[in-house]
């Protein structure tokens, strides 16, 4: 096609060093003459197909026809399902899954994946565990077979368990060096104190040193059951083929749950604070949050837009006084913070909506004042123009997050577990479009106005206002 265009646009003997006339519409391919609109592109995204095999395992996939694919197993199991004595088992098990099976040693497993040019990974969160692999579409069956092998046939050897304790303890030390991770663990600990969401994902040191092989087996027996799992695929994945492979390799997993059926117990939110003062640290790391809603709550879209309105900023990113976020403008003008990041973390029945920021010890009070002022403005006087701009930013962010088969696969697996279905991007876009400024004000008033916040702070935090002052600034007497 390119050669045809070149011949038609150049005359015999034409000097290529001189600019030629631009191509007219008649010379352009039809696909260039009429580009699809954003709405048409949203509707043309491949459909997510969902099926269920005999034992209750759900299979969901989106076929883009690409030469690579990502396939993974998403399991409704995480640190929230642990007790105080078993806290850390889910993450420990994630490590042990890759240490060899009845069919393959750890070395054989790693070489097998490496020789296929594939990538095998996993993660554990507070409510979900995932094991996924990315490779060529032609290796789809091999990928599914490996996932089934590590889930069903892991040896969980005593020697490997003892060796892995040291690995996890070193990982805990690395996490402790990441102050953002530390602050968010503290935030969960104070916001959900006395509940499973208040515990860390890695677990305490004493648990890591005392976890036994039987603890891992009990966790698998209780939680790794077909009705609690989703086999998700994205990229070049034919749904019929994936379902057939799921039946072949996962169909023999029993769906009988031994003992009590795991349920998500409500985790109460407590307005409170946790401060770790260390004046030798150069910067203060602080997170302030209120309780938000769960995944399936319709208020979540408005909270996502409010979260986008506040935005994020880092002084290394540059930017001037015309940034969309008013809080970022204040930081540029007055140097209130080194960085800040708004967040909206959702769980099944609850969530945390707030702000994490890093600043000098003498700027803490000024930043908190401006932050709470912005929170009150969201509840009372945010404008239609600001909301429309935030909606566009949110749309862009959500679409960029789905760039590639791995994030799409994760989105499919997570949504099937959370909602029981994959929300089509066109539906999500329509829900965002339906939000206006009044809706944002109403929802923010519901979750932010006159609510008790949770606060976690590490570093030189002497200037952080006491909890009583923070609480009294969560409303305006003039309203």
Image (cartoon, grey):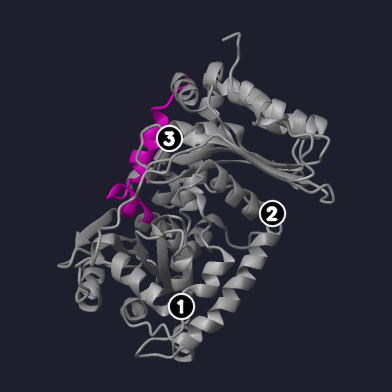
Q: Is residue 65 left or right of residue 5?
A: left
Which residue corresponds to mark 3? 301
Mark 1 closeness class: few <14, some 14–19, many ≥20 residues within 10 Å? some
Q: Is residue 430 left or right of residue 452?
A: left
Q: Are marks 3 and 2 in contact (CB under 8 Å)?
A: no
For the residue pair 206 and 29, the one nearer the viewer reads as 206
Height in image: 452 above or below 140?
above
What segment carries the magenta color? 414-437
Residue 416 belongs to magenta span: yes
Q: Which mark is residue 96?
A: 1
Residue 306 in the image, given as x and y percentages of width and height = 53, 31
Residue positioned most to the left: 54
| Main SS of residues in magenta | helix
Residue 13: name its quadrant: bottom right
If the image is split into quadrants, where does the C terminus sit? top right
Mark 2 closeness class: few <14, some 14–19, many ≥20 residues within 10 Å? some
For the residue pair 424 and 41, the one nearer the viewer reads as 424
Check disc 1 and report its element: helix, strand or loop. helix
For the residue pair 109 and 447, the one nearer the viewer reads as 447
Closer mark to the observer between disc 1 and disc 3: 1
Residue 316 in the image, given as x and y percentages of width and height = 77, 47
Residue positioned most to the top: 478
Residue 440 in the image, given as x and y percentages of width and height = 47, 24
For the residue pair 336 and 124, the one nearer the viewer reads as 124
Which residue corresponds to mark 2? 179
Q: Residue at position x 32%, y 76% from top?
A: 144
Q: Is residue 172 left or right of residue 114?
A: right
């Amino acid at each position: 096609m390119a050669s045809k265009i070149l011949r038609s646009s150049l005359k015999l003997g034409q000097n290529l060093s001189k600019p030629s006339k631009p191509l007219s519409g008649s010379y352009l391919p039809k696909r260039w003459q009429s580009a699809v609109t954003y709405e048409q592109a949203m509707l043309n995204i491949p459909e997510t197909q969902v099926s269920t095999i005999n034992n209750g395992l759900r299979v969901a996939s989106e076929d883009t026809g690409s030469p690579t694919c990502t396939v993974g197993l998403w399991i409704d199991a995480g640190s929230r399902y642990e007790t105080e004595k078993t806290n850390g088992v889910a993450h420990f098990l994630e490590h042990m899954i890759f240490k060899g099976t009845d069919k393959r040693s750890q070395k054989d497993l790693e070489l097998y994946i490496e020789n296929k040019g594939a990538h095998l990974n996993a993660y554990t969160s507070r409510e979900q565990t995932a094991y996924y692999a990315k490779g060529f579409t032609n290796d789809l069956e091999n990928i599914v077979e490996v996932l089934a092998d590590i889930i069903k046939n892991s040896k969980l050897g005593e020697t490997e368990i003892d060796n892995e304790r040291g690995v996890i303890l070193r990982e805990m030390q690395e996490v402790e060096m990441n102050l953002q991770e530390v602050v968010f663990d503290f935030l969960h600990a104070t916001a959900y104190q006395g509940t499973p969401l208040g515990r860390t994902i890695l677990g305490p040191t004493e648990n890591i040193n005392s976890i036994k092989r039987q603890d891992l087996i009990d966790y698998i027996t209780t939680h790794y059951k077909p009705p609690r799992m989703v086999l998700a695929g994205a990229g070049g994945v034919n749904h019929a083929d994936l379902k057939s492979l799921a039946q072949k390799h996962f169909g023999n997993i029993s769906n009988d749950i031994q003992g009590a059926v795991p349920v998500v117990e409500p985790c109460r939110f407590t307005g409170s604070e946790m401060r770790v003062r260390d004046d030798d640290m150069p910067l203060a790391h602080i997170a302030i949050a209120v309780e938000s809603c769960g995944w399936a709550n319709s208020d979540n879209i408005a909270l996502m837009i409010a979260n986008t309105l506040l935005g994020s900023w880092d002084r290394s990113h540059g930017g001037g006084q015309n940034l969309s976020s008013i809080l970022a403008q204040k930081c540029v003008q007055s140097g209130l913070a080194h960085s800040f990041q708004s967040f909206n973390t959702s769980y099944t029945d609850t969530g945390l909506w707030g702000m994490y920021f890093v600043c000098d010890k003498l700027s803490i009070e000024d930043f908190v004042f401006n932050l709470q002022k912005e929170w009150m403005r969201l509840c009372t006087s945010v404008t239609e123009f600001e909301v429309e701009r935030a909606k566009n930013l949110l749309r862009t962010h959500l679409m960029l997050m789905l760039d590639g088969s791995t994030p799409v696969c994760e989105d499919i697996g997570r949504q099937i577990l959370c909602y029981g279905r994959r929300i089509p991007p066109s539906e999500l876009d329509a829900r965002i479009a339906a939000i206006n400024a009044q809706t944002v004000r109403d929802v923010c008033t519901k979750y932010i106005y006159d609510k008790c916040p949770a606060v976690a702070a590490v570093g030189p935090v002497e200037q952080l206002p006491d909890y009583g002052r923070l609480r009294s600034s969560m409303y305006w007497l003039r309203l």
